[in-house]
Amino acid sequence: MASRRTLAHPAPGGPGAWRGVDLVVAAVFGVAMGVVFIAWDYLLNAPWTALTLAFPPASSLALGVWLLPAVAGGLIVRRPGAALFVELIAGVLEYLLGNPWGPGVLISAVLQGLGAELGFALLRWRRFGPGVAMIAGGLAASLEIVAYEWWSYAAEYAWPWKVAVLGFSVLSGVLLAGLGGHALVRALARAGALDAFGPGAEHAARSDRR
Amino acid sequence: MRKSSGRPRRRSTGGLLASCGPLSLLGGSFALMAGALATPRASGLMAGAALLALLLPVGCGRGGFPWRRMIAAGLAVASVAWSNWLLATPHSWAVAATAGLRVGLFVVPGVVFAAFVRPAELGDHLAQRLRLPPRPVVAAVVAVQRFERLGQDWADLSDIRRVRGIHDRRSPIRAVGGFAEQALALLVGALRDAAQTAIAVEARGFSRPQRTGVPRTWACPAPWTATDTRLMACCGGVATVSVLTGALIG
């Protein structure tokens, strides 16, 4: 490992110059994550529902899973709007398939995407390590809870519980979406699925050095 | 870019919702949502719910609605009521029921409306009527149309894992690990496919309007009709009634 971290591979052509491949791959990534979510629901729905009924804030511990498209999308495409775009696609897919929250899922997708976007914006879309991924995950979770869920699904919770929900969500966003998203993107790059993107270029550079 | 199919729009007999475009279905959902969240008291929520109970079946018409979708929404509303009872101080069934009713007031019609939104049509309307940037919209429509194939890929991967004997469900940890492997395989395949699709759409001029300024053409029109206006008026009316009733009747 080099001791001095050089600047990560930024998006080609400047951050705002979306290529066709950025758009198509980001959109398909969002839909594929939706398929994975549906399979996950099928596998784990029953035990998870039982757990959340016994202790409702536990459902916040799973929030990070739903933020994965935003964080991973931002890490892959590395352009302003990428996190929001991918999260919106995943949200629209859930909406069309008849998810239980109706239009609420679209509000959530916008807020989660914007939160993650804020995390990447703080480092001006130049750093894409685990640190910025964790910040993006944490901010995505915070915005979702503070701007929406406190006033809708958790409207009557006592304040200590509202704060607990926020804490669990941020923890989940940082660990599952942040670290998990970073690991997911690394794995995809290793598999050669991201050759047209920054993570793929970094993986190639790492293998050359060895 | 030209869209692949000029399929005529499906129009079932009867039912306001079936002949509405996607924008009024979405706009109506959001109007109801804003109304529900702004309604101060249970009386208003009940007035809104009563109106919706009358209007929704009429809106669905004889074409009907896949009512199975309502099971998950019903569970979601029940879980909201339950958690707002459990975690409130003091515990109050009235307060919890109000919280559940408030969420139900936008979730139930929202789920019904969503069943009438067609993805390709939504893309047409978002780009042509709302004038959202066309490239992201078209990319999104392309991706959503992949959904069923990706679902089939997932089933194929499951079968392959079973046949090869690497499908292990004896311990939950291994099951989760296997799930992660399978998810990664699906994503890798999807992303490689997407990169090829990107080349294909670029070859057909996906980004050309961006580069040359030649206006993009669309295969299907995206009209806003009188039915759309009617739906918006109904949803706005229900929202107004529930807010006003809640504010005036204690």
Image: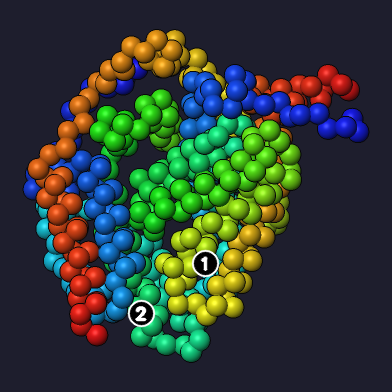
Residue ID at (31%, 60%): B33
Disc 1: CA contacts within 10 A as few (<14), some (14-19) or many (>=20):
some
Residue behind mark 2: B97
Residue ID at (38%, 75%): B99
Under mark 2, the amino acid is: Ala
Quarter in which the N terminus of chain A is drawn: top right
Describe residue B121's horizontal placement relative to residue B99 as left or right.
Answer: left
Describe residue A49's horizontal placement relative to residue B168 as left or right.
Answer: left
Asked if marks 1 and 2 touch (Cβ < 8 Å), the reply is: no
Same chain for the residues at labels 1 and 2, yes or no?
Answer: no
- Residue B10 found in image quarter: top left
> Residue B182's spot in the image, x, y percent?
62, 40
Describe residue B220's horizontal placement relative to residue A6 as left or right.
Answer: left
Residue ID at (37%, 26%): B134
Under mark 1, the amino acid is: Thr
Secondary structure under the numbered disc 2 in the rendered image: helix
Residue B167 in sight from this viewpoint = no
Residue behind mark 1: A49
> Residue A31's spot in the image, x, y percent?
48, 38
Q: CA distance from mark 1 to mark 2?
A: 20 Å
Front tag of 1 and 2: 2
Residue ID at (27%, 29%): B128
* Chain letter, disc 1 residue: A
Quarter in which the C terminus of chain A is drawn: top right
